[in-house]
Amino acid sequence: MQKTMPSKHKSYIKRAQLFGTVLILAIMSLTSLLVTGNAGAAQITTRSLTISSGVPSASSQTYTYGFTTATTAAIQSIEFEACTTAIGTCTGPTGQTINAGTEASRSGWTNATTFVRNATGANGCTPAANVLCLDRTQVAGETAGARTLGWNTQTNPSTANVAFFIRITTYSDAAWLTSVDTGTVASAVVQTLTINAAVAEILNFCVGSSIVNDATTSIATDCTGVSGTSVNIGTLDPVSVNVSPINTNGGDNKNGVAMVRTNASNGTVIYYDAIQQSGTNHLGTLRISGASCNAGSVSTDQCIDAQGATQAAFTPPTEKFGMTIGGTNCGSTTSYSCVYASGTNNLEPSTNYVGAAANAYGTSNGFAWVESGTATQIADTPGATKVIDDEALVLRFASISAITTPFGSYTAQADFIAVPTY
Amino acid sequence: MNLSLLIIGGLFALSNSVVFAQYTSTNYQTNEIQFGIGGDLDASSTNYKAQTSAGSLAIGDTSSTNYTAYSGFLTPNEPFLEMGIDTSVVNLGTLDTSSAKTGTAAFHVRTYLDSGYTVQTISQPPSMTSGAASHTLAAMSLGSSVANTEQFGINLKANTSPATFGSDPVPFPDGSFAAGVAASGYNTADQYNYNASDIIAASGGSGWGLTNFTISYIANISSITPAGSYSMVHDLVVVATY
């Protein structure tokens, strides 16, 4: 028995068949579209942009593009288009100028011919502040693969904390006509972040006495270890010059020292001035305090003649008093290499107070002493590095008496002053 | 017949309008699909355009050997990059030979559709801005803070020495969405480092999204660090690879 299908059901079946046919056609059409969707410019992969600064409006920057081309083909022209968005209508980022500069770096390119900026452009590339058109004549193909291209004289967008996108298109011809690969990179300029700090001024300056008589033995760790207020050069003799340290005839075997630590970046100068004692004439030299001395060089009064501002060696039996710097002691310096013999000390004796030539430690150059009380420079920091880490001037005093110099207890006093410039 | 033409036309429109896909294989791709109770990729009229989503079943990303899927309320179909400095000034104060001075600054990076990013520090350490002399604080190699030694260093971690300060990178809202990490050399607590051009932060995994970073700064001086005012414009550059 055969059943006859109602015409209504036949209609449903026909509609279902029609729908199925349409659906299959639709899927086939979609599949075809998706498979052939990359028939034009292929996607540049592994693409990035490294900018040399993220500061808004920074000029003279280098933008380095890194990307992997998908197609083996000639690349004779490139368009870089800076936009505020990755896709869609391109609006140039405010303040950004990429249409400038020259090729700054490259890697991975098959052909060595460099790209140049083309200010005229053509076809797919119209130069503008946000559009950079590059070209070269190089018909040989570029093997697909990773490469970089750096371009200088670029200016960042002016708006902080905003990303920008640069759309890259390569062309096989030199006129931006036949595109090969394309891709977009992104970067960002950010708000300025400022780190501030301050370093306070430091000056540790001390004067004392020490048995150290060289430029290398540590006098003290720092100024806290420097002590003593006097140097005794013993009983004077018209036959020989007493030069500190003296360990005979009553001498205390000590030199004077002046140690400095400062972070003054513009230099430090050390001065002394002779304290004026009571009495008459020659108040600032080695003398018996309160004595009346004669003006001029007189060897019969109770004032020993000061050498004066010009350094000289002492010769018996002419009475003289003076001071020199045996050398700059680096024994306590830890922050940098300091060797007086090599001239790597920062604090250097000044003219007329250099004890010996060629950074030798000693007193062979002689002595000087300004008795007037005028501040007299004895050391400074003439080198490029001005800061001083516990360098110490070894102050060596010398005197000789004349046959006619009256007996007694003679004293000289001095102030020492450090003037750092920060 | 009219029905079939309508469907084909709709599919043409869909395939031509999408540039970036979230589901791909060698031969097929689908674009911006949604599983959920509602939403519209392109709700537009003459004057308005909107993307909407409602009641997403799950958000985050997932992947296998051949597929990667990204889901959420909205998954825009274009690459995205955002970097912001959330601090304008860090004042370390007057530096001291007896103890380190510290400070922090915040920045954030948010990316989408990239295969990774790095953040580079470009600037030299703070240099003297007062007077005619010049001096730049010594950049430190990876190590601890040492008082009375001139040092300038940073890291991107929560520290307890020389003080309790700083923070580890914080993905937002959690690690499912963002995976920014401190880079090698800047990822050990209480260890500081500084070298201009170093990478200090990077994406550490497959997550795309926002990561908040905190830079921890330290500075020490010696007794001969030149006196004066010091300043550094900290130039940070993000490099995203797509």
Image (cartoon, coloured by chain):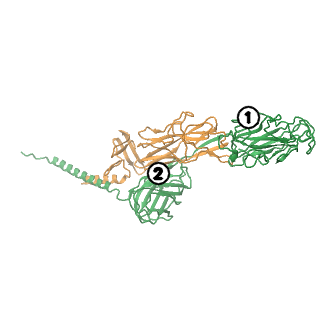
Q: Mark 1 sits on what residue?
A: A226
- In this view, the residue in front, A349 or B59, is A349
Q: Sequence-wise, which precedes: disc 1 or disc 2?
A: 2
- In this view, the residue in front, B91 or A251, is A251
Q: Secondary structure at mark 1?
A: loop
Lateral position of residue A54 relative to residue B2, left or right: right
Q: Which mark is residue A22?
A: none
B148 w.r.t. B4: above or below: above
A47 w.r.t. A392: above or below: below
Amino acid at the residue labelled 2: Ala
- In this view, the residue in front, A204 or A11, is A204
Q: Which chain is green?
A: A
Q: Secondary structure at mark 2?
A: strand
Instruction: Pick the quarter of the image with the C terminus of chain A.
Output: top right
Q: Mark 2 sits on what residue?
A: A186
Whole-percent x, y for residue B33 in the image: 34, 46
Q: Which chain is orange?
A: B
Instruction: Pick the quarter of the image with the N terminus of chain A.
Output: top left
Mark 1 surroundings within 10 Å by alpha-carbon count, few (fewer than 14), some (14 through 19), many (20 or more):
some
Of badges 1 and 2, the one in the foreground is: 1
Lateral position of residue A34 relative to residue A90, left or right: left
- In this view, the residue in front, B220 or A290, is A290
Amino acid at the residue labelled 1: Val
